[in-house]
Image (cartoon, helix red, strand yellow):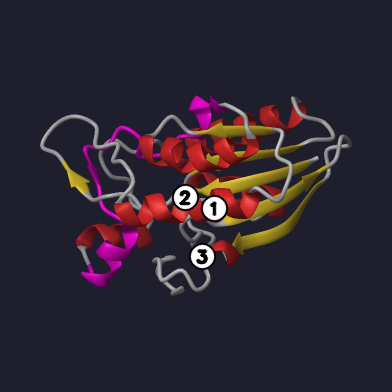
Amino acid sequence: MELLLIRHALPVRRELDTGIADPELSPEGLEQAEHLGQYLAYEKIHTVYASPLRRAQQTAIPVARHQGIEIITEDDVAEWDRHSNEYVPVEELKAANDPRWQAMLRGELQEHQESPDIFNARVISAVERCIANHGGQTIAIVCHGGVINAYLTHVLGLTQYQQGFFYPNYTSIHRVAAARSGERSIVTINETAHLRGSGLPMGIFQKS
């Protein structure tokens, strides 16, 4: 079967005194998501899963709509900071050399963050469960950068880098071939052809 791990589109910045930030997509993010859905409309996707966080749900909507199917919410592919009271796109943190960016580079846990071991176990178990339920099919899981890092480093055996192996661009597609025997092969990483020439932001290192 083929697995598509997809990072959500660009969300808005949200910083609260209390409560959970859980931001929605920005106007640019909504456009990114629509480009993604149109791009994948030429493929047959049997099931679309999404994290319960709003940025993932909104990104999944065009993908599911173009396939004529409903979104299935998978709680265990939520991001490690799902309960945080703030969300600042990492590009903004990096551009401002924000202390939170430096803390991320050092791998320091912040308040409301899940421990790496618990997070990685949760993500890997969830992705493998989705794979097991769809033998011979193609599924998409719309999720988060940390989730994608956790699963791909698991496949590669690079477990020491699970929290920051690489940077997934917004709405990037990461394809994995999964055999019934248990073999997992990475087919593509950071596939963003649907954003080329759109003028929309892609991430830290690439521009459209």
Would you call the spot at circle 1 few (<14 residues within 10 Å), some (14-19), or many (20 or more)? many
| Residue depicted at 14% across the width and 39% down the height | 16
In which image quadrant can residue 158 be found? bottom right
Residue at the outermost right position: 181
Residues at marks 1 and 2, CA–CA distance in whole angstroms: 5 Å
Give residue 157's position: percent from left, percent from top. Answer: 69, 52
Can residue 122 be seen by looking at this rendering? yes
Tell me which label, 2 or 3, sits earlier in the chain. Answer: 2
Residue nearest the observer in this picture, 163 or 52: 52
Query: What residue type is disc 3 on?
Result: Leu
Whether label 1 touches label 2, CB < 8 Å: yes
Q: Is residue 15 left or right of residue 90?
A: left
Q: Is residue 176 left or right of residue 87?
A: right
Residue at the outermost left position: 17
Q: Is residue 134 left or right of residue 20?
A: right
Residue nearest the observer in this picture, 158 or 40: 40
Can residue 149 be seen by looking at this rendering? no
For disc 2, the marked residue is 33
Indicate whether residue 87 is drawn in magenta.
yes
| Residue depicted at 21% across the width and 64% down the height | 98
Query: What residue type is disc 1 on?
Result: Leu
Would you call the spot at circle 2 few (<14 residues within 10 Å), some (14-19), or many (20 or more)? many
Q: Which mark is residue 36?
A: 1
| Residue depicted at 61% across the width and 34% down the height | 48
For disc 3, the marked residue is 195
Residues at marks 1 and 3, CA–CA distance in whole angstroms: 8 Å
